[in-house]
Amino acid sequence: MAESVFQSVPGQLASLLRDIEAATRDESPLPVLGFAAYNDFFLTGNRMRYEKLYFQRRARLNALAAQALLDPAADVTRLADVLWAVCDEYTWALPAHIHYGQGFGPDQTLDLFAAETAHALAEIVTGLGPRLDPLVAHRVRTEVERRVLVPLADPRPLAWEGFGNNWESVCAGAAGMAAMLLLPPSDRRTLILDRCGKAMDRFLAGYGDDGGCPEGVNYWVYGFGYFVYYAVMLHEQTGVDLLDDPKVAQIAGFPPRAALGGGAYAPFSDADEHPWLPAGLLSLLADRFGTQPATVIPSFHDDHCYRWAHLARTFAWYRPSDVVSPPADSDFLPDLAWAVDRGPTAVFAAKGGHNDEPHNHVDLGAFLLHVRGRTVLADLGAGEYTRSYFSETRYDHLHPSARAHSIPVVDGQLQLPGADRRATVLRHEVLPDGVAFDLDLTAAYEVDGLRRLVRRFRWWRTGRLELTDEVVADRPLPLTEVFVSRYAPAVADNAVTWNDAVTLAPHPAPPSDPDRAASGPVEVDVVEATDHHGRPDTAYRVLVPVTAPAGESAHTFTFIVH
């Protein structure tokens, strides 16, 4: 099994090796996944308290397994204890996902993390071979079979079949790899791999031809990463090459097209602005597709979920490379309707799409300005994942709601969620000095008297953005233009400055003629929330009131980068 046999580790991975060595020195007792911890989610909706303990256990497993597979002389006694303890867990699925078990009990719920655990255990046991006590190896194989392979071979549909997003590739990819590692060739194994293949087809169908991931670069790492890991093992074992597909080549090149520079990426939807990218995955894709190689060696702790597949393939596949191409001045993903344009000191990005995307935010026409390594006009990315965050009350939470995005409020009405709430791209044109990007946002709102709302962006790479909202209305409509930042704004004479980096030029006072467009005094709304990791997160919403008269009107806002 080439994926977990680390024959030659490049010197560039020395920092990762040090991380692992330090982690293996932790001889404290494993965190206990007792009933109180497990039941906490069902009582409170909080995910983080249980998951922190769960992932600490996976960190110990990964560190000891990596040590053992890197050093043939390493003692595997402690690793055997951890493997045994993982087999003792009530379920490998997270409490937040137990409802996906459908006809299976919690201990056989095949979610993302049960599949990942099955793959990790299967690969570790296979890699260690006779070095591991046969009783431990037998128990691991038995638990992987019972908890994951039995549901996967059962004809009843699994909850995630049809999701068309990262769930398809991670669940099918990780569980499918476990099947390839532990099952001999047989009709049952063929049935399982056929089922996994159909899931991979649905996963690819969830991408447009532009190869863009609507969930952002961190979910690209997750979903596409497991697709690639599964595809490589499948090719080695069967000769079938899932990577031999033009769409796969497009998907492989997605991250640089969403890049803001300095390791930051457009954080649309529930994306992380600073995701970590597995060095092994990037090396494999660079060799196969000529995409950007790894330029940063992640820490062992960068993946807070401690997924074995990413770690093992970094040791197996990473190869240093000096061939790094500069980013393009401008990128456009037509299926996602994302535009990114890069100047010498600032980057502009904006999005269209629809309001029922995977990990959806209500955000049509949202934009950001990234200046010298800081996202000043922001998309907040993901909030803290809780039970209600993934329920009918999702948009009561700040991060995915329309309130958290730089988009207009029309007559007091926010944008609405739903697949029919779409932005139509009217124009995307790369110009010698920047980009023009126009979106029809009319369908995003349901406001009596609103006939048309078009948002036009004109960005100059020298650091100037003109945003014009054109309104056609049957009656005078109050608009509130909203501009979101994590930096406290300074407001003076109706001009707004964020972090001494970006200034919104002042707007005229309301005119005496009520039939003309008018603007009012700028206000600042401060909203407190928690980010994806449960840390305090403060958003500053600059509110600029404008009145759109009956008929046609245009409202232009000019941002200057210092």
Image (cartoon, rainbow, N blue to C red):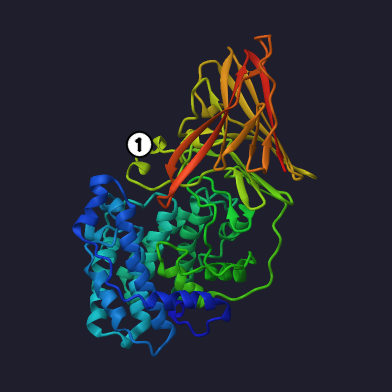
Judge whether residue 104 can be spotted in this image.
Answer: no
Measured from the top left, where is residue 134 in percent x and y? Answer: 25, 84
Tell whether 456 sits left or right of 119: right
Seen from the viewer's position, the closer of residues 543 and 179 is 543
Between residues 496 and 280, which one lies in front from this camera angle?
A: 496
Q: Residue furthest right?
A: 432
Q: Quadrant of the N terminus?
A: bottom left
Task: Give residue 391's position: percent from left, percent from top.
Answer: 34, 40
Q: Secondary structure at mark 1?
A: loop
Seen in the picture, residue 476 relative to 347 is either above or below; the reply is above
Q: Quadrant of residue 192?
A: bottom left
Q: Residue at x 51, y 16 (%)?
A: 448
Q: Please determine whether, in this image, residue 37 is positioned above or below residue 446.
A: below
Question: Taking 2 as reference, is 559 above or below it?
Answer: above
Count of marks overlaid on the render: 1
Q: Residue 147 versus residue 44: which sits nearer the camera?
A: 44
Q: Does 559 sit left or right of 377 as displayed? A: right
Answer with left or right where residue 35 lies relative to residue 547.
left
Name which residue type carries label 1.
Glu
Query: Crowdedness of circle 1 by 10 Å Cα count: few (<14), some, many (20+)?
Result: few
Relative placement, left or right, of 533 versus 443 is left
Which quarter of the rendering shows the C terminus?
top right
Residue 25 lies, in percent from the top left, at: 37, 78
Expressed as whole percent of the image width and height from the top left, the position of residue 495 reads 67, 30
Judging by the rendered image, the residue that carries numbered circle 1 is 392
- What residue occupies the far bottom of the structure in this picture? 73
Q: Is residue 216 visible?
A: yes
Vertically, is 101 above or below 489? Answer: below
**For the point 32% across and 87% down, which residue is it?**
131
